[in-house]
Image (cartoon, rainbow, N blue to C red):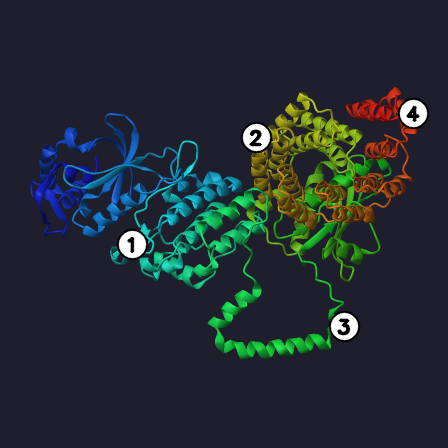
Amino acid sequence: MNSDGLSDSLSSANPAKCEKCGATMRLETGVCASCLLREGLKGAGEVSRAVYESVLAEVDVPDKQWHLGNYEILEEVGRGGMGVIYRARQRHSHRIVAVKRVLSYHADSHETRERFRREAEAVASLDHPNILPIYEVSESEDGLPFFSMKFATGGSLHDAAPSLRSEPRKCLQLMAKVARATEYAHGRGILHRDLKPGNILLDHRGEPMVSDFGLAKWIDANKDLTKSLTTFGTPGYIAPEQAERTADDLSPAADVYSLGAILFDLLTGRPPFLGANALSLIRQASETTAPKLRSLAHSHDRDLETICARCLERDPKARYRSAGDLATDLERWLDGRSIVARPISVPTRLGRWSRRNPKLIATGAACLLFGAATMWFFRGELAKIVPAAPEKSIAVLPFENRSEDKANAYFADGIQDEILTRLSKIADLKVISRTSTQHYKSAPENLPEIARQLGVAHILQGSVQKSGDTMRVNVQLIKAADDSHLWANSFDRKLTDMLLVESEVARAIADQLRAQLTGQEEEVIAATPTDNSAAYDAYLRGLAYTLKAVSTPANSLGAQTYLKEAVRLDPKFALAWALLSYADARGYLSLTLQPTVALSEEAQQAAETALALAPNLGEALLAKGYYHYAFLSDHDTAVRYFEQARQLLPNSSRIPESLAYVARRRGQWDRSESFYKEAERLDPRNVYLLSQHAFTYAALRRFPEALRKFDQVLNIIPDDVDTLANKAAIAQAQGDLPRASALLAPLHLNANNSVLALEVQVYQAILERRPAQIITRLKEILAKPDPALGFINGEFRFWLGWAQDIGGD
C-alpha cells in the first residue's frame, strides 16, 4: 500500500491546506497524510503512533485501495513527476494492462490535469505498432483522471541497454523503428519532447513502443499551457533549444536530437554529456560540440559516428530534416548501403567558428597568407615529405633460428609470434600483424625501407638458439629512421622459462616506446597461458602450421594434430583450445579439412572450453565468433563475439578481417570493404587478406580493382601460382582468352602445387574447346587420388565430366 492509495480511500469533499507543511489535506479526519506518513516512518512518539493507527483504522482497503474504475490494481510499477503507473487487471476481460493516474497531491493543479489529459489525447490519436496504445480514458470515483494502456512486459530500453551494448545491429534496428514511430507522430502534428531510454518500452518480443507523451506538444497549435510548464524534458537527452525556447518555437528537430542522444547512449554506455546537475548538462549541450562516437567506442565505424553526430548538431537546421530521414539512414546502414548523411565539412565548421570569433579573422588571414608564402618558397622540399609513422608503432620481424637442428624453426617462429601477440594487446601501440612481417628476412639490411612499407617507426629483431632443455634469445629494438639501437638484451634460460622471457621482452618494449598500459593489459602481458612446457611446445608447433602463408590440407591437419596434443597434455590450456577451434573453422572454410559433423562439434567444444576457462581471453571470443560464422552462418552472434574480442585485441587484423567476411556474406559490400581496409592498415602485407579483398572486388565485377589487389600480392610473393591463376580467371570472366592463356602458360598442371591453378587451366581448355589434353591429365590424377585432397577429388570428377561432354565423349 502507498500513500496515494491511503489518501484516495479517505478523501474529503472539502480539502483544506495543512498549516504545518502547506500540503492539501484530503482526509476526512482532518489529518495531513504527508505529515502523518513522515511521522509514522520516523516513529516519533506515542502521539504520532496513536494518530497514525486511528487513521489506518478508517481506511477502506478492500473496496477502494485495490480498484480504479474497472481495473483491479495489482502492483505499482513506476511513477513520475505527475502520475503513478500500476500493473492492473481489467475486471471483465481479465486483460493485464498498465493504468496511469494523476498523483493525489497534484489533483488541485489545473496545469497537471491538463497536461495529463493532453497526454491521453495525444496517444489516443496515434495508431502505430511502435507507439504504446491507450485502451480507455476515464476518471476515478473522486474525479482523478486516469487511462489504461498496453502493459509492456519487456521493461524499458533503459533496463535493456547494458545487454544491447554488444549488439550494435540490434540497437540500430530498435532505433530505426522508434524513429519511424516518431516520424508518424510528427506527421500528425505531435512532438514528444521527452524521448529518453526510460520512455521506450519493450514488449515480450523485444519490439519497441514509444510511451509517455506527457510533454507532447501539437505542432503549429497555439497552446499557451505549454509555455507555463516548468518541466521541459530530461537533461542529457533534450535538445539544447528546449531549455531556451518556448514550446511553440520547437520543431521536429528537437526529437531528432533526442533520438541521436539515445542511440549514442546505447552504443557507448553513456549519454553525450555528463554533469553534476541539469544546469551543467544544458550548458554543455548548448555551448560545446557533442563528443565523437568513436572517441568513446572505437569499434564502431565512421558511418555510425556520422549518424550520431548529425542528430546531435547544436543547430537544429544542421540535423536530419526529419525523424524519417534518420530512420532511412539507420536502415541503409543495416542493409550495408552507404548512408546519406555526410560529416560536416571543415569549411562549414570553420565558417561557424569564424562567425563566433570575428575578431580573430584578420589575424587568421594574415597567418594563412604567411603560411601560403612559406609553402610556396619551400615547395620543392615539401613535396618530398612523407607522413611520419606513429612513434608508438612497431613491427616484429621473423626471429632467426640459430639452433643446430633446423627443425626447430617452429620454435623461433613461435617465440616471435607470442611476443608480437602480447604487444598487440596494448591499445596504445600500433603493432603490425605477423602475416605482414613473415615475408622479410630475420636480419635485413634495408630497415628504413621495410619500416616505410609497414608504416612503423620501430623494428624488433631477434634470434633463438635451442639446445637440449636450454635456450638463448637475443632481441634488439631499432629506431628505423636512423637505424639506431634503442634497447637490446640476451636471455639464457631453461625452456621452462620461455613464457617469462616473452613477457619480459614485451614489457621492456612497451617501456621503451612509452606505451600507457591499463591494469588489464599489464595482466595480459604477464600472463602464463600454461605451466606445462610440453603442452606449450606442442602449441608452438601447431601455431607454426596456422601461420603458413598458404592454407593446404597438410598445414590444416598439422595444426589440428599438434593443438589436440597440446590440450591433451594440459586440458586447462585456454589459448590452445581457442586456436584449435579457429584452425578447425578455417580448415572448414578453406576446404582443407573434411567438412564433417565431427569437425563442427570439435570446433564448438574447443571454443566453449576456451571461454569457460578464460572468459576474458580475446582469442577465445574470436574463436567462438568464427565458429558461429563458419559452421552455423549465425552472423549476428558471430559479430557480437567479434566486437567483444576487438576490445581485448585492438591490433588484431583477424577481427576486422572476420567482420569483412560476415558483411560480404550478407551482401553488405560497402561495409565489407571498410573492414578490409581497416584490416589492411594493421596487416598491410597479408597476402591472404589482400587476395580475399580482391575476390570481393571480382564478385562485384570490379575487375580493375581486383587486379590491382592481386598485383599487390605479386609484389610481395612474385610468381605466386594461385595469384596468377586468379588473374587468369578474371581475364576469362572478361572474355579475354588470349590474356588468360598467356598468364596460365608458365603454370604446370599439377594438383599438388595448386588446385586452383589446375581448375582455371581446365576451364580455359573447355572455353577454347580443346579438352583432349585436360581429359588425359584429369584421368591420371583420379587414377591415384590423393587422400589429403578429400572431396576435392569430387570436383576433379566434375571437371572431367564437363571436358568429356565438350569432347563428345
First-in-chain label (3 vs 2): 3
The circle drawn on residue 612 is 2
Tag in front: 3 or 2 = 3
Q: Amino acid at mark 2?
A: Ala
Q: CA distance from mark 4 to mark 3?
A: 63 Å
Residue sticking out furthest to the front: 808
What residue would you read off at disc 4? Answer: 776
SS for dot 1: loop
Residue 270 is situated, as x and y percent measured from the top left of the image, at 45, 49
Nearer the observer, 72 or 114? 114
Q: CA distance from mark 4 to mark 1?
A: 86 Å
Q: Amino acid at mark 3?
A: Gly
**Which quarter of the rendering shows the C terminus?**
top right
**Which quarter of the rendering shows the N terminus?**
top left
Residue 336 is situated, as x and y percent measured from the top left of the image, at 59, 43
Residue 671 is situated, as x and y percent measured from the top left of the image, at 62, 45
Nearer the observer, 94 or 133? 133
First-in-chain label (1 vs 3): 1
SS for dot 3: helix
SS for dot 4: helix
What residue would you read off at disc 1? Answer: 231
First-in-chain label (1 vs 2): 1
